Image (spheres, grey):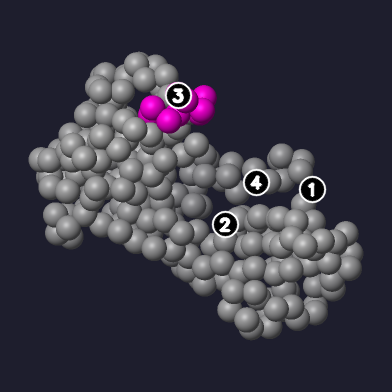
Amino acid sequence: MRINLFWEDFQPKPDVISEEAVKKFDELIKICHEVDMKIAPTFFVGHMSGENWDVPWRESRNIYSDSFMLRHQIKLVRFFAEKYKDESAILFWDLSNEPDNYIKAESRHDAWLWNYVLSNEIKKYDFTYPIELYLSYMPDVYKTDRSYLIYKYAKELSGIEYNVKVESPYIEVKEFDYNGKTLVLFINHEDIDIDTKINVREKTKNSEKIQDLISGRQINLEYLTIEANGVVAILLEKGV
């Protein structure tokens, strides 16, 4: 299970690691052992599900390149890596969750520096657990970076057939069974509006308008704009 470490809770001041927050984390570790569960702690969570958070002491500094911010981010990951390096309930470390939704790296070099400095600090103490790195949002990376382009085609390469397909590779699709029907969510994780086309199989015609359950408006699946960090939800008949 992925666990987000709310940054301000664990590091309320640059040079302070909260004993109270760490105590709660230790309680969580104990529960993990009791139920035989592993967790992936996520540092520096500044964005989640369309909402942004920040540490008050950042004061507009850039987390990727500012020496003050890097120094104190190192302090937090060092603490966890050193204290929990032999903890069997840890599955892997995750540096962040979509931090570019509230602070963007000014260049790919700054994004590289941030990943390199923090991951290497963890590896000084913890040789066991993997580290999930983070690729900052930058238009030039979207266009040229080989690793990011793999993400673009991942759904096609997987060979999995979905009832609903979305044209844009940057929209996440989730399908659920709901009262004998299919509930479909379209999630835009980017901080820009995305225009896309949605293809629905069989019973629903793509040209028909259908209600977005979140906004209540009627939408056209052939010409759909999903707002920045927005979600669209539709309900389809079974067998679609």
Q: Quadrant of residue 76?
A: top left
On residue 153, the disc is 4
Q: Residue flagged by tag 1: what amino acid is it?
A: Glu
Q: Is residue 178 magenta?
A: no
Left or right for 233, reference 107:
right
Q: Give the mark nearer the N terminus: 1 vs 3.
A: 3
Residue on which disc 2 sits: 170
Closer to the observer: label 4 or label 2? 2
Taking the spot 33% from the left edge, 54% from the top edge, the residue there is 46
Residue on which disc 1 sits: 161
Left or right for 92, reference 147:
left
Q: Residue flagged by tag 2: what amino acid is it?
A: Tyr
Cα gap from disc 4 to disc 2, whole angstroms? 10 Å
Left or right for 116, reference 229:
left
Closer to the observer: label 3 or label 2? 3
- The image shows residue 89, relative to residue 77, as above or below, that is above
Q: Give the mark nearer the N terminus: 1 vs 2.
A: 1
Left or right for 135, reference 117:
right
Q: Give the mark nearer the N terminus: 1 vs 4.
A: 4
Cα gap from disc 4 to disc 3, whole angstroms? 38 Å
Q: Give the mark nearer the N terminus: 3 vs 2.
A: 3
- The image shows residue 82, relative to residue 17, as above or below, that is above
Residue 158 appears in view: yes
Residue on which disc 3 sits: 33
Foreground of the two, 153 or 96: 96
Cα gap from disc 3 to disc 2, whole angstroms? 37 Å
Q: Residue flagged by tag 4: what amino acid is it?
A: Tyr
Range of magenta residues:
29-37
On residue 238, the disc is none
Q: Give the mark nearer the N terminus: 4 vs 3.
A: 3
Closer to the observer: label 4 or label 3? 3
